[in-house]
Image (tube, rainbow, N blue to C red):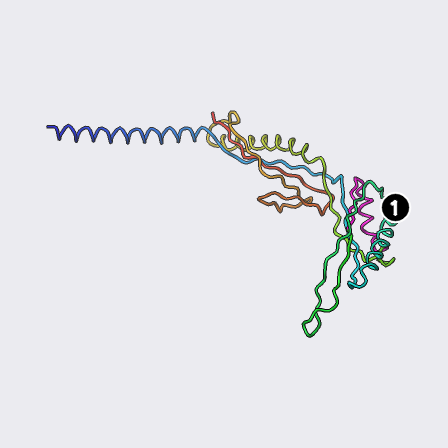
Amino acid sequence: MKQNNLALSIIIGVCLIISSSIWAISYYNKDSSNSLSVTGSASKEVVSDSAKFSGNFSRIVKVSNLKTGYAQIAQDLLTVKKFLVDQGIDDKNVTISTVSMFENYNYNNNNTQVEKEYTISQTIEVSSSDINKITLLAQKTQDLINKGVIFSTNAVEYYYTKLPELRVTLLSDAIKDAKARAQKIAEATGRNVGDLKSAASGVVQVLPANSLEVSDYGTYDTSKINKNVMVTVKAAFSLK
């Protein structure tokens, strides 16, 4: 009799566990069916309001001519400064690095090192809200080369400085877009969208105008003046 009672107790216990599990699964599914997660997006075309131009000038000299090389760099700097003034660039917009020097490793046909040789260089950066002036500046650097300065330039970089403020506005619009999408999906099942339960913003994409080349980690194009700023939001809404 005791064995029968023990067996009955075990059976009842197992049934209770199974019953609890089924209730838990049913409750979870019910909760999941009462919410809907969607992704919304918003974008806006903007025009860059800041630009940066950068370049460097250099001299390659033998170790025995380092003094002459530094003198040439100093003269090149004066030529570059005059060039910037002639282009209407204000000193406050110019950043000039210190002179840098690194050794060039040259070997002759016998694989023995010849006299040490160094590259001496200096970098300048010009930043301004005058986009046209910076663009024209980059196009006229041939004048420096014509004057004997060994000058190399980087592509002009264009920025939009009001991005933090715009991001806030776009996030709000993206949530509205997410809710509109959720409503369309809910209507297809005869239900309506309720309150916002949670929201998580995605990365900001700053793309060239008319471009769709987004990145999972976000992107910030600096090559074009006209840009398209886009944000995404993953939002969850209750269903009624």
- The x, y position of residue 81, in whole percent, is 86, 48
User: Is residue 228 within the magenta segment?
Assistant: no
- The x, y position of residue 158, in whole percent, is 73, 44
Secondary structure state at the residue bearing disc 1: helix
Task: Give the side of residue 158 with respect to residue 27, left or right.
Answer: right
Q: Quadrant for residue 16, please give it.
A: top left
Q: In the picture shown, does residue 217 fall above or below 110?
A: above
Q: In the picture shown, does residue 25 fall above or below 123?
A: above
Q: How many numbered tags mark residues here?
A: 1
Furthest-bottom residue in this view: 110
Q: Which residue is mark 1?
A: 85
- Of the pair 133 and 185, the residue shown nearer to us: 133
Q: Quadrant of the N terminus?
A: top left
- Of the pair 126 and 50, the residue shown nearer to us: 126
Task: Give the side of residue 206 with respect to residue 14, left or right.
Answer: right
- Of the pair 210 and 170, the residue shown nearer to us: 170
- The x, y position of residue 118, in whole percent, is 75, 61
Q: In the picture shown, does residue 9 fall above or below 205?
A: above
Residue in the image at 72% along x and 62% along y: 104
Q: Which residues are magenta?
A: 123-143
User: Is residue 137 within the magenta segment?
Assistant: yes
